[in-house]
Image: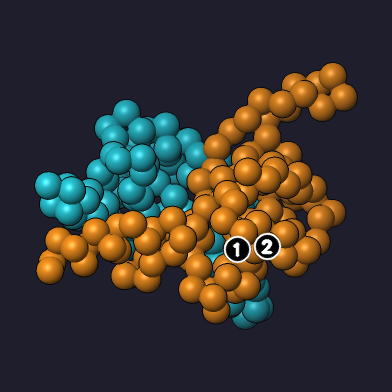
Chain colours: A orange, B cyan
Amino acid sequence: MGCLKVSSKSSPASVAGAIAGMIKDGACVEIQSVGAGAVNQAVKAIAISRGFLAPIGIEIACVPSFADIVIDGEYRTAIRFSVEPRYLHGTATTHGAQYADNGHLASN
Amino acid sequence: MGCLKVSSKSSPASVAGAIAGMIKDGACVEIQSVGAGAVNQAVKAIAISRGFLAPIGIEIACVPSFADIVIDGEYRTAIRFSVEPRYLHGTATTHGAQYADNGHLASN
């Protein structure tokens, strides 16, 4: 699993490319951001990466959570996004394929 | 489907309560936010609502996208989060139950 640290100065398009690359390789992606500006860039990156992945049939979803981290000796609360492929509307993604297959077996 | 408009002054805990209530009722939730501060509050609200829903066995994921909206005659780009229950680690959520059932049928 890859971990991307996104700041308020990160380019959403660049981060999106990194997300798309890792998801294509079958990895789940963790994104960490501290502060409203960084969280905003991370969310934009995830939205942009959807556009990179949709044409090859991969849909993604993200799950946000809090994480206590230490930066320069100070405690901060970071937002972590776990980005993963998801099963949607009968389209099988890498991780959802098993459920689609099961559905076929059950209906045969 | 409910639509929540979140601003930078919205209370994440309150929004989280609204999200959890709608998800529990089986609805999907759309959250709209404009600006980094608003996006940050929305993400915090989603993270908090996970804590409300986890004890009753519901996991959620969100899918961010861009939306062009008009505020006071000006075009702005909003971030929209589609929040929905998801199937996870063999735990059947409301929407994932059918796949879990199919899995059982296939393996019997």
Q: Residues within 10 Å of mark 1 (few under 14, many from 20)?
A: some
Helix, strand or loop at label 2? It is helix
Task: Name the foreground residue: B37 vs A20.
Answer: A20
Task: Name the foreground residue: A97 vs A61.
Answer: A97
Callouts 2 and 1 in the same chain: yes
Q: Residues within 10 Å of mark 2 (few under 14, many from 20)?
A: some
Name the quadrant of the N terminus of chain B.
bottom left
Location of mark 2 (residue): A21
Q: Chain of mark 2?
A: A
Figure check: B31 above or below B88: below
Task: Name the foreground residue: B66 vs B90.
Answer: B90
Q: Position of residue B42 (x, y in %)?
A: 54, 49
Q: Is residue B64 left or right of residue B54?
A: right
C-beta proximity under 8 Å, tags 2 and 1: yes
Figure check: A51 above or below B83: below
Task: Name the foreground residue: B46 vs A58.
Answer: A58
Q: Residue at x 52, y 53 (%)?
A: A84
Is residue A99 visible in the rendered image? The answer is yes
Helix, strand or loop at label 1? It is helix
Figure check: A22 above or below B78: above
Q: Residue at x 35, y 50 (%)?
A: B86
Q: Residue at x 55, y 79 (%)?
A: A55
Is residue B9 visible in the rendered image? The answer is no
Q: Position of residue A76 (x, y in %)?
A: 73, 27
Q: Position of residue A32 (x, y in %)?
A: 69, 42
Q: Chain of mark 1?
A: A
**Which residue lies most toward the right here?**
A72
Location of mark 1 (residue): A24
